[in-house]
Image (cartoon, coloured by chain):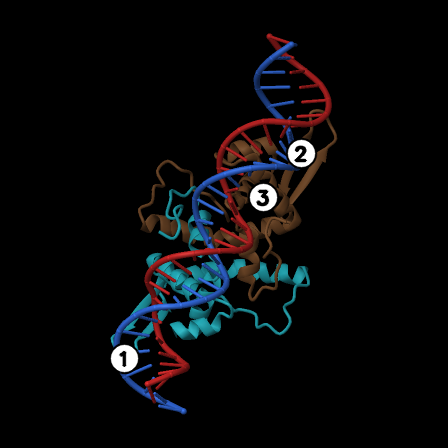
Chain colours: A cyan, B brown, C red, D blue
DNA sequence: GATCCCCCTTACTAATAGGTAAGTACCGCA
DNA sequence: TGCGGTACTTACCTATTAGTAAGGGGGATC
């Protein structure tokens, strides 16, 4: 629904992987979940400054469909929903490690504004 | 020009890297160039079935700006332009390796239509 | 009892990525 | 003369993605 072109026949693995992480916040969601293990919706929201509830929900749903995140709803009041990475999600994060390292290199090369921002471990 | 949000302040390396490979054909361009070493515009075009000249030019220009590809114009008639990967481009391809492997795994899991398609080496 | 928090959903709108088609300038070939 | 090939550029249009704003149902807090 969200994307018509998703899950299409891929030519190579890169495509299949990029399809799953393409989305403005997905990389960060993956990172948050990797760092914290388990996060609730509102925590995630606070951890991703600027994200709208719509986008967060949408991305989380897509990532759940893609088997990257596990969504656990506790039938309580107030409702509590916990998100965590699945094995595949953690594997993706691992696979993203070298790419992250390359990105950090690039930021360094460009003298990007890295000031005061903690560098992700991602691996 | 092409993207307003590019080269912005990144939170993590993943973002910086994804920014550079996000684009419908960039992964494949990287792959083509990695496999063949040097390619001309028309060769690249034939290697990427479905790409339009506009998109190919645009992506190639962005990748040149990003320091991933080297563009060499030979002042001949007819014009000859050769594209190849820079060191950074090759490094990116290396970094993309694990991600590609993950993608291949995912395709396998989903029983995706991989039939008859050569699997990229990517690493 | 009004308001806040929880976790979303829906509708509407803006921005951007990508596709289509045509044009450019030159040459070789038939 | 006219077509095909070289490597693009430009204009226009649509599809997809993201942002804004609002609602909703229930309980706790002020």
The answer as to whether the residues below labels 1 and 2 share one chain is no
Label 2: chain?
B
Tell me which chain the residue with mark 1 is part of.
Answer: A
Residue A70 location (% of width, % of height): 33, 66
Residue bearing mark 2: B81
Q: Chain of mark 3?
A: B
* Discs 3, 2: same chain: yes
Circle 1 SS class: loop
The residue at 72%/25% (across/down) is: B77
Measured from the top left, where is residue B50 in percent x and y?
Answer: 48, 35
Q: For marks 3 and 2, give the one nearer the viewer.
A: 3
A14, above or below A25, in the image: above
- Position of A54 with respect to A50 (left or right) is left
Q: Are marks 1 and 3 in contact (CB under 8 Å)?
A: no
Whether pointer 3 and pointer 2 mark residues with C-beta atoms closer than 8 Å, the reply is no
In what element is the residue under mark 2? Answer: strand
Task: Return the disc, 3 or 2, that comes first in the chain's sequence.
Answer: 3
Q: Is residue D28 left or right of residue A120?
A: left
The residue that label 3 is drawn on is: B59
Q: Compared to A27, does B23 lie above or below?
A: above
Pointer 1 residue: A77
Residue D8's spot in the image, x, y percent?
A: 65, 35
Quadrant of res B15: bottom right
């Amino acid at each position: 629904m969200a994307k018509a072109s998703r899950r299409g026949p891929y030519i190579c693995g890169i495509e299949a992987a990029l399809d799953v992480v393409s989305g403005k916040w997905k990389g960060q969601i993956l990172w948050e979940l990797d760092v914290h293990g388990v996060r609730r919706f509102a925590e995630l929201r606070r951890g991703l400054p600027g994200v709208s509830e719509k986008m967060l929900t949408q991305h989380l749903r897509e990532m759940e469909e893609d088997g990257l995140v596990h969504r656990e709803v506790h039938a309580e009041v107030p409702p509590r929903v916990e998100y965590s990475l699945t094995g595949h999600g953690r594997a993706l994060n691992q696979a993203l490690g070298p790419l992250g390292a390359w990105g950090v290199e690039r930021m360094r090369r460009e003298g990007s504004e890295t000031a005061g921002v903690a560098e992700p471990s991602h691996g």
